Amino acid sequence: MKVLFKYASLLAAAVMLFACGDDKNGNEGVGTADFRLVADKDVIQSNGQDASTLTVYLDGEDVTSDAVIYDGNNEEVTLTDGKFLATADGEYKFWAAYGTYSTFDKNEDDNGMITIKAISVAVPDAVEDPQTSNTSFVHRAFLTQYTGTGCGYCPYMIKIIRELMADKTIPSKAVLAAVHSFSNADPAYISAPKVNNYPYMHIDFATGFSHTQGSAPLYSQVNSIASSDAKAGISVNPKLYDDGTLVLKVSVKAAQDGDYRVGAWLLEDGIYGQQADDGKVGDSSYNTHENCVRLIDSRYDGAWVGKPVGTLKAGETAERTFVMKVKLTGSKPWKIENLHLAVIVSKGEKDVYTVCNAIDCPIDAPTPFEYK
């Protein structure tokens, strides 16, 4: 197995850029090149010792020694052996230029700059994979429920979901994330994502599902997805620190060649909120809400299907680090014992990505790749 270190730095850097002028062979005219700035770590410790190495590539050739690297203030950066170190927590942005080529692009997220996050706590190691040649993973559907305590028809969808979850095999077939985005009066309210009609559900961000369809079609789709071959697997090593910093080392292992993205969603169970019920569908138990989304680190280029980890061949693994801040103090802190994670991997091309696997995992224990 070959392990590829492809981090969040590739978010903006993996874009094809076009430049006018001389190409790398000195030919005049309009040149088309894959010009990118890559960091081998997107998260480092702010201890002045942990380092992220920045490398500039032009059509796969390392041109770092002749390139100029700038920070987010457009100031030239001097690095020793291409290594960036930090002594203070924060987010540090960089872009690169080489001849007529530049990774700075106002039309891209963060203007085409890569971001390295420095934190005071340690980043956990990836979970060890004892089956390096195995690419046959358990496959789960990712169900995104759009709901809210002020939505009078949402109990219809809640009823369907409860009927689905009554099947004890479902946890091995599906992961549910409840997005309470209907109204900010909701105790589980999150500002995004939103839909035009509530209740609603996305299945793998590929198809939609309405409560008017009943539970049978949802059950059929979940079973169909779970019985199909998974295109990738996911492992997660989380670490929650006393200050509420939650650091995740996520590994994605491809079962098929392709371009992959990964995202992390923090969920909380047992949130109480009086549920509107125009159809008198539910009972008092409907006032307690499960799998409520608290944080999402999954948005890229306007979509919620995850952030790039790169192009992988079957059997290759890419890693990505996520940093979340758990609300432990203040008004209505989150209950640690009720928190868990939904981590998704998506596959696609030409900016069309759909979720191809998902896992639900704890915040306080490693979750290895789950093989069939």
Image (spheres, grey):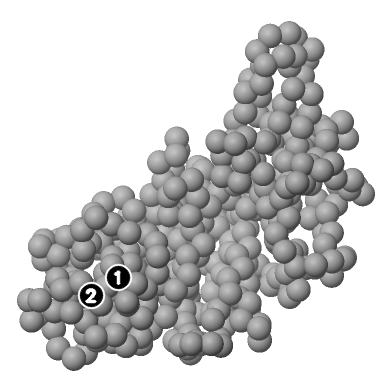
Quick one: SS at disc 1? loop
Do callouts 1 and 2 mark residues in contact (Cβ within 8 Å)? yes
The residue that label 2 is drawn on is 150
Spot occupied by residue 270 in the image (x, y as percentages of width and height): 35, 87
The residue that label 1 is drawn on is 183
Evaluate whether residue 264 shows in this view: yes
Q: Residue at the location (45% across, 35% down)?
A: 350
Tag count in the figure? 2
Q: Residue at the location (58% across, 71% down)?
A: 324
Q: Nearer the viewer, residue 350 or 115?
A: 115
Q: Residue at the location (77% across, 41% down)?
A: 74
Q: CA distance from mark 1 to mark 2?
A: 6 Å
Side (left or right) of 50 relative to 349:
right
Q: Amino acid at mark 2?
A: Gly
Evaluate whether residue 172 shows in this view: no
Mark 1 or 2, nearer chain start: 2
Q: Nearer the viewer, residue 1 or 226?
A: 226
Split into 4 quadrants, where in the image is the C terminus? Answer: bottom left
Q: Amino acid at mark 1?
A: Ser
Decide: is 276 above or below 104. below
Side (left or right) of 212 relative to 147:
left
Residue 99 quadrant? top right
Quick one: SS at disc 2? loop
Spot occupied by residue 338 in the image (x, y as percentages of width and height): 44, 86
Q: Residue at the location (55% across, 49% down)?
A: 308
Decide: is 285 above or below 366. below
Outermost residue, top side: 28
Spot occupied by residue 255 in the image (x, y as percentages of width and height): 49, 51
Residue 230 quadrant? bottom left
Side (left or right) of 7 relative to 219:
right
